Image: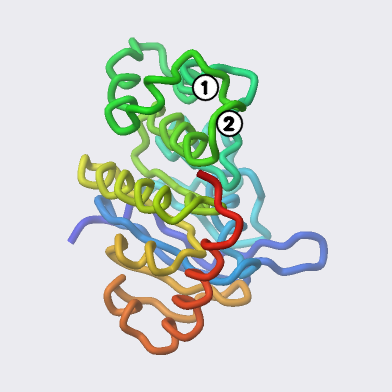
């Protein structure tokens, strides 16, 4: 069995007096896709923000490749090969597609051309729009750009926060196909998703977070077939993504 590339131990995150994450523990092994699913406000994004250094946890530890990175500066964490595709894409709207991609490699000193072509291989539409400003792209294209920017950092672990949010179902299918391809190329993935159906279909293992705690865990297939998961998540998420999609 592969060693854990990421270990989360009794993580607690608070905002003022509000407990967002209440002592969760899980791991991600090298070569896996692991997904955290749960309702909005369950603590999924707070977990990711703590791992990436954007929020300092109240207690607990984040171990990446055997090193304690709890509360370290986000730049230091990125330099170790842990990249995040943030919720809401967070691209630079006034910069071109190519400039956005190059920012993803800002810690690198080597030639970027090979990796730029790799990103364009995953997302041919970005190549067609390489000199177009990011803010003029559609929602789906901006999500492609956010993923491509993270890949430019050559991640050892790629964290993705709600990559399907606000996108039309056909675009969501394309994004998840790219996630599969990135994984097959050797990248370990930690995926945060409200679209439980899509997430569980691609996941090796999955955790259900409820009220800041892990309520269930298992393989993606096991949770897809679990009646409680199906009743709580699989129906409501499908309805959500059909409302107000972006192309």
> Can residue 106 be seen here?
no
Between 129 and 8, the one lying in front of the other is 129
Vertical placement of residue 8 versus 163, above or below = below
Residue name at image x 48 percent, y 69 percent: 238
Residue name at image x 47 percent, y 78 percent: 235
Q: Is residue 115 left or right of residue 228?
A: left
Q: Is residue 243 left or right of residue 67?
A: right
Residues at discs 2 and 1 in contact (Cβ within 8 Å): yes
| Residue 231 in picture, x, y percent from top left | 47, 86
Label 2 sits on residue: 91
Between 224 and 186, the one lying in front of the other is 224
Tag count: 2
Q: Secondary structure at mark 1?
A: helix
The CA distance from mark 2 to mark 1 is 7 Å
Vertical placement of residue 243 versus 150, above or below = below
Quadrant of residue 222 within the rendered picture: bottom left
Residue name at image x 44 percent, y 21 percent: 105
Between 215 and 171, the one lying in front of the other is 171
Label 1 sits on residue: 100
């Amino acid at each position: 069995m592969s060693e854990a590339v990421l270990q989360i131990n009794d993580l607690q995150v608070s905002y003022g007096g509000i407990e967002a994450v209440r002592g969760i523990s899980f791991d991600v092994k090298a070569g896996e896709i692991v997904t955290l699913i749960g309702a909005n406000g369950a603590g999924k994004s707070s977990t990711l923000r703590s791992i990436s250094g954007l929020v300092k946890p109240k207690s607990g530890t984040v171990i990446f490749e055997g090193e304690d990175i709890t509360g370290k500066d986000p730049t230091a964490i990125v330099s170790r090969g842990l990249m995040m595709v943030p919720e809401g894409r967070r691209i630079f709207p006034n910069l071109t597609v190519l400039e956005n991609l190059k920012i993803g490699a800002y810690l690198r000193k080597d030639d970027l051309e090979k990796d730029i072509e790799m990103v364009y291989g995953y997302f041919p539409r970005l190549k067609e729009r390489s000199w177009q400003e990011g803010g003029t792209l559609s929602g789906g294209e901006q999500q492609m750009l956010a993923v491509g920017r993270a890949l430019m950092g050559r991640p050892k672990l790629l964290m993705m926060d709600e990559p399907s949010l606000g996108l039309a179902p056909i675009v969501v299918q394309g994004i998840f196909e790219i996630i599969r391809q990135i994984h097959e190329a050797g990248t370990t993935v930690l995926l945060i998703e409200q679209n439980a159906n899509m997430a569980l279909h691609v996941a090796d293992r999955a955790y259900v977070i409820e009220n800041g705690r892990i309520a269930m865990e298992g393989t993606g297939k096991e949770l897809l077939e679990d009646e409680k998961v199906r009743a709580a998540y699989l129906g409501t998420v499908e309805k959500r993504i059909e409302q107000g999609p972006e192309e």
